Amino acid sequence: MQALWQDLRYAVRMLAKSPGYTLVAVLVFGLGIGANTAIFSVVNAVLLRPLPYPQSDQLVLVRERSSTFHNGSVSYPNYLDWRAAQHGFTDLALVRRESFNFSSDTGGEAQPERLNGARVTANHLALLGLAPQLGRDFRDEDDVPGAAKVVLLSDGLWRRRFGASPSVIGQRVLVDGQAREVIGIAPERVRFPRLAEVFVPLADLRAQENVLSRDNHPGFSSFGRLKPGVTLAQARAELDNIAAELERRYPETNTSRRVNARLLLEASVGDYRQSLYLLLGAVGCVLLIACANTANLQLTRALARGKEFAVRTALGASRWRLARQLFTESILLALLGGGGGLLLALWSLDAILALSPQGVSRFQETRLDPRALGFTAAVALGTGVLSGLWPAWRISNTAALSHALRENGARGSSDGVHRQRASAALVVTQVALAVVLLAAGGLTLKSFWRAQEAPLGFNPRGVLMMSLSLPKARYGTDEKVAAFYAQALDRIRALPGVVAAAICDNAPFDDNESDSYFHLTDAPPAIPGQQPSAEVSLVSPDYFQVLGMPILRGRNFGPQDRLGAPRNIIIDESFAQRYFAGKDPLGQHIDDNQTMDKTAPPVTVVGIVPRTRNEAPGEDNIEKLQFPQMYFCAAQEVSRGNMLLLRAADGTDPLSLTEAVKCEIQALDPEQPVAAVATMEHNIAASLATRRLTMTLLGIFAALALTLASVGLYGVMALSVTQRTRELGIRLALGAARGDVFRLVLRQGMTLVVCGLALGLLGALGAGRALATLLYGVGALDPAALSFSAGALALVAALACALPARRATHVDPMVALRDE
Amino acid sequence: MTTHNQPLIHLDGVKKVFLTDEVETHALAGIYLEIRHGEYVSIAGPSGCGKSTLLSILGLLDSPTEGGYLLNGQQVENLSFAERARIRNREIGFIFQSFNLIGDLNVFENVELPLTYRNDLASAERKKRTTEALERVGMGHRSRHLPNQLSGGQQQRVAVARALAGSPSILLADEPTGNLDSKNGDAVMELLADLHRGGATICMVTHDDRFARYAERTIHLFDGRVVDDRLPAAQTPVEAMSF
């Protein structure tokens, strides 16, 4: 222990004696460790941290899987059958994300709000293993049609809206215009469904005709808790068997339908797993580069201290003792770097979180918790050992030491590159890792650019969006709903600065999707399970004008498309090409799935519009399923919930119209809130958040890697020039021109670079494969991205070599005459 | 022995002053010297007398502060770095005290090295000259060895071959036996004498009288001046001089 203390004191003294070296080493360690700490903190918060429920690893999300949808919503009758027949779960619950108009029923002045919420079965909280922090949970009798209307509030809503007053229990609030009694406050940690603040039982939904239809999948998800001893695979197999039985009993609706059962944690954040592990891998590479860099620094310094170690050896120091001294210094440096890294991580976390997907609370909950601190300490110790390993071995190798000492003798031959083989290997490693990161950065950069440039089929500039939903309690008939929206659109259209206004229940980039089967009238019936599907939107006539979409053929919706009149639709180009190839789509008939009346006459195609991209590039509906689009007239197919879209006049900031629009809505119905106010461009940008995060961080890490590798290369080349001064002098004395010497040094450096490039490009091929599923519109072996990474590195590396090479040309040839 | 009317080297009042910390050091205080083709000259003198400075100016590694230097009839004291490099490469062959072979190059590559700096020499010609030079010093059989696999004497032979390979006008040898034992020193001196008999012009710096006697002419320097310049036969015994 005393020896260790002595080593430590000596290490501190040695490092203090060389502040420049210490600063550089701590900085390099700090950058590597800090980047790792920051990314690990995010990975820990999002992927590794268990869900905040007791035995959360037993919670399983169950969705439906079909030939079309890998992760489809659950049909209510199927849920009932699963629940009744299964034995692997303690129970199964059903939930659906919704949003509600919420206001107090107390005559207060608080504005009505549109809040995220959920319809849940009564066992929702109990299955999560939680109980309300105040009041009571739902009971089975709350969750039957006709039951008294009750509601559970989230902790956040309770605090924000009711000042955490316990007296809220028993109060009545308005949820979608319907008075409900607050029976309890959910625990603060409830995060399922995502962002929900208001929980209401399924209750009346259980009696609705469309919900009771087995072929309707109205956005439900099921989840359950595995019984002790039951594995996920066993439970999944059991549910699949039940689904197979349902297929046999209901072939019309359940052919090819099975279950998609995943752990709730995986289902919640699985989409981010690959991106985050990729980033963790990238910072791992940065750390390795930092290790190689500091190992080189330490090796150089250790060799410079050769005489000191020789004296220690002569005085009886063992090899282990010498190695331990160097290890102590290395670990001390790494720990100092770890401290700096922590500061860097703290500082950078805010920036990282600002880039993260905003709707995923686990990202925003990222903190430097004890696990992250433990990780930092472990990484700092590990890097200290790793980077100290080679110098310690080198200096403790007494043969090597004695050779190093002899090198100062008069053997008469210079000894350049051999002595630097280890340094060269470390530089090659750094360059190779930097190329891998640059290639990955290049690929994601190009992918992001392609995603941004992906044709939308509409003009998003100047479009403002907001959602509103009319409560059934006050808008009980389609006529009332249609009248409200017609008046609202008339008022909004009249606002100065508004060019056009429309509604749509499934607008592009509104975090909502609606798909439906259809059947071409007169075509043979489709095989069950293989019915064609299309994305469905209910739009008002000005919708296409708001989005700047031309009517390519036929006509737009008009006054003739009113409630009760024969129903017409507009289709997009892809629909026309796929299903009406070789014939005129206009006037064709389609049996749709929008009405429960199976005897309803088919709809008629009256127009064709361009294909639009409604979701972020890479989403299944676009890339894999390539659903065509059907537009119904909102006057004929009435929806209470809609996005309100308006186009602002040129030169008008769309967001500046928000208050005026809200006023018009309030003027029509003071109880009617609007929500999700954003420009279309903002929503498009938000849809690329994960890509932007990956691209930005990979870009930063690649730049960091390039800088560290270049500094490492420069260091080795500068050292090489110093060590080869005599050799260079000899060459100059023998008649080498300055250009010869410049090329000699440059060639030596670039040889290392080329070796690193070759290895790095091989690594980049592997990295490209790992990235493939995250890329959009770019191949994993994209020549431009790979050339860019190789070119950027070669250029920077050439600069890093050119400076020492230039210095080499100024060596005085007289050194050849001086004896060593 | 080749004879020429014009001297190979002509120094006219060459001075060299070093400025260090505002102190002027007169390393050479006006050297007048001629060396003719085929001469074997040794430069002797005590430590600090200016031998090495003179050799570095003769070898175009350094420029005189004052005075003129004609090499093969060409004024060379004010040439650019590149021009001096070119002349060093073609006209001068260096033999250093510590051999100065490059450790990462084998014997053949070391000898070939100065020839690689000539852009007008084909690869085959380079190989031929290198082989000839190595044969001439009796090291042809060790051409694939690295310097650290050779004895000191052998390394110096290789260094001589390197100096010869470019067919220079003059060989400048700086204490060529300084790092060798007497046996190997003798062998190297025999080799130089042999080259001289074959027509080579040699200018050697040495402080060892035994080796200075191999030269046909000895120039003594003292305090940066030539204090004696005579043929060995007429020379005052060196032992008598208080250097």
Image: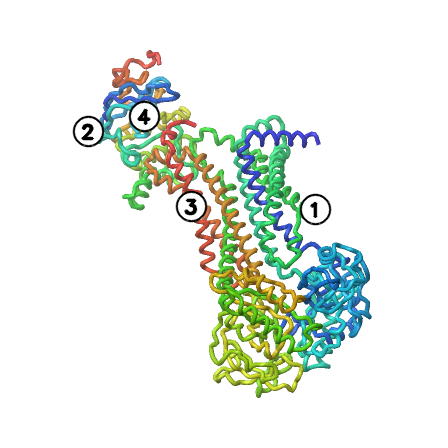
The answer to whether the residues at label 1 and label 2 have Cβ atoms under 8 Å apart is no
Query: CA gap, disc 4 to disc 2?
Result: 23 Å
In this picture, residue A796 sits left or right of residue A693: left
**For discs 3 and 4, the disc positioned in front in the rendered view:** 3
Q: Is residue A106 left or right of residue A408?
A: right
Residue A38, position as x, y percentages in the image: 61, 48
**Residue type at numbered disc 1:** Pro
Asked if badge 4 and badge 2 are on a common chain, one would say yes
- Distance, label 2 to label 3, CA atoms, is 52 Å
Could you tell me the amino acid type at mark 2?
A: Thr
* Quadrant in which residue A520 is drawn: bottom right
Q: Quadrant of residue B229?
A: top left
Crowding at dot 2, Cα within 10 Å, few <14 / some 14-19 / many 20+, comes out as: few
Write down the residue under mark 4: B55
Q: Which mark is residue B3?
A: 2
User: Disc 3 marks which residue?
Assistant: A798
Of labels 3 and 1, the one closer to you = 1
Nearest to the observer: residue A16 or residue A720: A16
